[in-house]
Amino acid sequence: AQSVTQPDIHITVSEGASLELRCNYSYGATPYLFWYVQSPGQGLQLLLKYFSGDTLVQGIKGFEAEFKRSQSSFNLRKPSVHWSDAAEYFCAVESGSGNTGKLIFGQGTTLQVKP
Amino acid sequence: ETGVTQTPRHLVMGMTNKKSLKCEQHLGHNAMYWYKQSAKKPLELMFVYNFKEQTENNSVPSRFSPECPNSSHLFLHLHTLQPEDSALYLCASSQEGVYGYTFGSGTRLTVV
């Protein structure tokens, strides 16, 4: 069965420091991968997605993620974190092909930003 | 505003009450979803509708009853809920052939 693991439940970084959030997936075929961000009391906002092609994908708010098939990973990165990036981040994989309606989420990583 | 609107934003209900959550999208999407987000748990897919037809029911208890009258509207009817049903209920929509969902801001439900 498809699954997504985010090994870090909580991460704290200093403002201006670099950030990497880890995501590992289990999926038999080529996965469709996503990163979402959720601010307190809000829904989820799509940061970026990977379907095929270039394994380094750029997203909104200065985020990027790299798909590494050999490691079954899709880690999210940002070179310099801003205080407004404090939120919960979810990695997700879409199983099946086309619009099957099965986005499988990881448990999420809470990011805290220190001044 | 994401294009997916959920009402109400907050709801407190007793275990014997009946209430409904509403989700509306005017993005032209053909699929809509209900997710449940509980503390310290991954998001759980509850129901999927494609072109108004339910295509997924993820073993959800019958006290949750979805309704999709058209491609733009989705309801979740609630009755005789339990305290453990307290959670953030998120609605999302997507378009066939375009991957990734657009989420609403959710309804924070508290069952007392």
Image (tube, coloured by chain):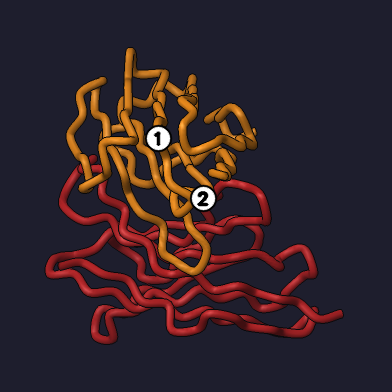
Q: Amino acid at mark 1?
A: Thr
Distance, label 2 to label 1, CA atoms, is 15 Å
| Position of residue A4 in the picture relative to residue A36 (left or right) | left
Shown in red, the chain is A
Where's residue B29, x and y in %? Answer: 37, 26
Front position in the image: A5 or A23? A5
Residue B10's quadrant in the figure?
top right
Where's residue A68, x and y in %? Answer: 32, 79
| Position of residue A98 in the picture relative to residue B89 (left or right) | left
Count neighbours of disc 2 (C-alpha within 10 A) and say few if under 14, some if 14 to 19, many if 20 or more. some
Residue receiving disc 2: B87
Q: Amino acid at mark 2?
A: Ala
Shown in orange, the chain is B
**Chain letter for the residue marked with disc 2 in the picture:** B
Residue at (56, 38) in percent of width and height = B107
Residue furthest toward the right?
Answer: A115
Image vertical order of residue A64 relative to residue B78, above or below: below
Mark number displayed over residue A58: none
Marked residue nearer the N-terminal end (2 or 1): 1
Residue receiving disc 1: B80
| Position of residue A18 in the picture relative to residue B51 (left or right) | right
Question: Foreground mark, 2 or 1?
Answer: 1
Image vertical order of residue A38 relative to residue A114, above or below: above
Secondary structure beneath dot 1 equals: loop
Query: Where the C terminus of chain B falls, by quadrant?
Result: top right
**Chain letter for the residue marked with disc 1 in the picture:** B
Residue at (57, 58) in percent of width and height = A37
Front position in the image: B110 or B50? B110
| Position of residue B19 in the picture relative to residue A84 (left or right) | left
